[in-house]
Image (cartoon, rainbow, N blue to C red):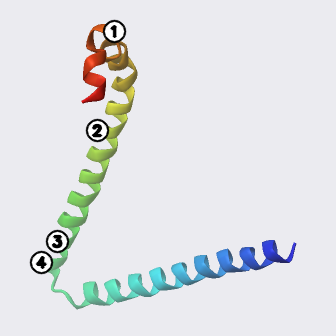
Amino acid sequence: MKLFAILGIMVFSSRYLYMAIQSNHIRELMDKLEALPPERLDEVEDFIDFLEQRNQDRRLTLAATQTAENSFSQVWDNPDDSVYDHL
């Protein structure tokens, strides 16, 4: 029982530490943003939008791949093509 309590404290502590580090990092980024001229802020915003779009594209590609995998498995997994399974 003591071990679970210790592990719980460790997990809580590591999460708290991570959140504190992340919070500090966010503050540092905000300080840097506040120091930029307005035209640079537009560039930063464009870059953030680009990163968000890229992440969304990757999620959609992964979802499409996972969806198609079942359909293609019926085509790929057949006795005629079994020789290719060991390449």
Q: Which residue is mark 1?
A: 79
Q: Are marks 1 and 3 in contact (CB under 8 Å)?
A: no
Gap between marks 1 and 3, in whole Å?
57 Å
- What percent of the width, then of the height, locates residue 48? 25, 65
Q: Which mark is residue 61?
A: 2
Q: Amino acid at mark 3?
A: Asp
Q: Disc 2 marks which amino acid?
A: Thr
Element type where label 1 sits in the image: helix
Q: Which residue is mark 4?
A: 39
Mark toward the viewer: 4 or 1? 1
Q: CA distance from mark 4 to mark 3?
A: 5 Å
Q: Nearer the viewer, residue 12 or 43?
A: 12
**Type of amino acid at the residue the image marks with label 4:** Glu
Q: Residue at x 32, y 32 (%)?
A: 65
Badge count: 4
Q: CA distance from mark 4 to mark 1?
A: 62 Å
Give how far across and how far down residue 13 sits, in percent: 64, 82
Q: Residues within 10 Å of mark 2 (few under 14, many from 20)?
A: few
> In the displayed image of the protein, which residue is found farthest to the left?
39
Badge 4 or badge 2: first in the primary sequence: 4
Residue 25 placement (x, y as % from top left): 39, 84
Q: Which residue is mark 3?
A: 42
